[in-house]
Image (cartoon, helix red, strand yellow):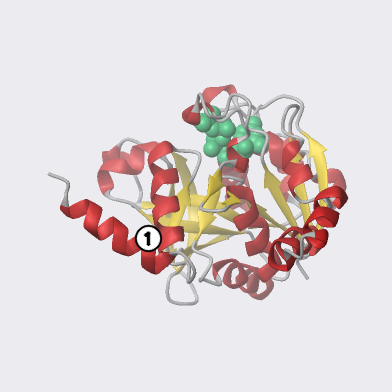
Amino acid sequence: MVSKAVLPVAGLGTRFLPATKAVPKELLPVVDRPAIQYIVEECARAGLDDVLLVTASGKSTIEDHFDRLLDLEAALEDKGKTDDLAAVRDLADLVSIHSVRQGEALGLGHAVLQAEHHVGDESFVVCLGDDIVDPRTPFLERMIAAHHRTGVAVVALMEVPEDQVHLYGVADVTPGDEPGEYRISELVEKPPVDEAPSNLIVVGRYVLPGSIFPVLHDTPPGRGGEIQLTDALQTLAADEPIVGIVLDAPRHDTGDKLGFLKATVELAAIREDLGPDFVAWLREWLETQP
Ligand code: UTP
């Protein structure tokens, strides 16, 4: 059974400066909770009860967010603010949170490698700490079920317009066992449009076998001098198939300014408490725009 999730949150967040100079991008609030909370909630919904944060110096407030805060709880209790109290207290009980330091931001593959001691040789999930998937979709459950069925690595895929493939890791695919599922024979990092094997890119959700760790140990720095998870997956794909499932729901890269704005609008719009008023205001406001 897959029970552990690894959430790399040790990146520098340079695309969101100056906001991320002192505040980790994973803590930037989307509506009323930090981006990372959506991801931990997604893990809990998928039945994962053990979350390892791969963090870095200056980012310990991410762990604090999931810890108890007894003074605050007592103050809320005294004031009879039961809803706020539940929101704060339930968060600490959501999953068991662990952390490990990356030391130096040497790439996503290097961040995942820091989880080796905690995970051992079990299969585990990796969710990027700034990548929010629509909370209404059970996509991670579907990925975990595909891993249990096939026993191999499963990655999330997303279709992008052809003129954007050069920005991402692109998968060479053949149809798989189920609709929306593919077998990946090769992953190509940021190919020119005319060399891209498809318009399916790999996005921030992975179910990986423990056998990825020895591969990561042997993966040399690649693009940007960083140890890339895509390069390790490419090595893995030479020995065993990798399954890709196309994400059929909205997903937002909140580490990017435009992605963050879109996430804020969409996640506010689907909220029962805020959505109707927010959408009504947004419609009115758009009509005043040239
Ligand atoms: P990104 O590439 O989006 O993060 O990695 P980044 O390097 O912080 O981004 P920019 O380009 O400078 O803005 C996706 C996730 O992987 C983590 C990041 O924290 C983010 O949640 N990451 C990335 C690490 O934990 N360690 C790394 O060395 C790189």
238 shown above or below 278: above
Which residue corresponds to the image point at 24% horizontal and 52% vertical from the top-left? 285
Which residue corresponds to the image point at 66% horizontal and 70% vertical from the top-left? 45
The quarter of the image holding the C terminus is top left
Q: Percent from the top left, x then y, of residue 51?
A: 77, 54
Q: Residue furthest left?
A: 290
Q: Percent from the top left, x then y, of residue 88?
A: 74, 58
Camera-side residue of 186 and 169 = 169
Q: Amino acid at mark 1?
A: Phe
Q: Is residue 244 left or right of residue 79?
A: left
Q: Percent from the top left, x then y, of residue 221?
A: 62, 26
**Element carrying mark 1:** helix
Which residue corresponds to the image point at 43% horizontal and 76% vertical from the top-left? 179
Q: Is residue 38 left or right of residue 102?
A: left
Camera-side residue of 121 and 71 = 71
Which residue corresponds to the image point at 35% horizontal and 37% vertical from the top-left? 166
Which quadrant would residue 48 be assigned to in this image?
bottom right
100 shown above or below 146: above
The quarter of the image holding the N terminus is bottom right
Residue underneath mark 1? 278
150 shown above or below 286: below
Report crowding for label 1: few under 14, some 14 to 19, many 20 or more residues within 10 A (C-alpha): some
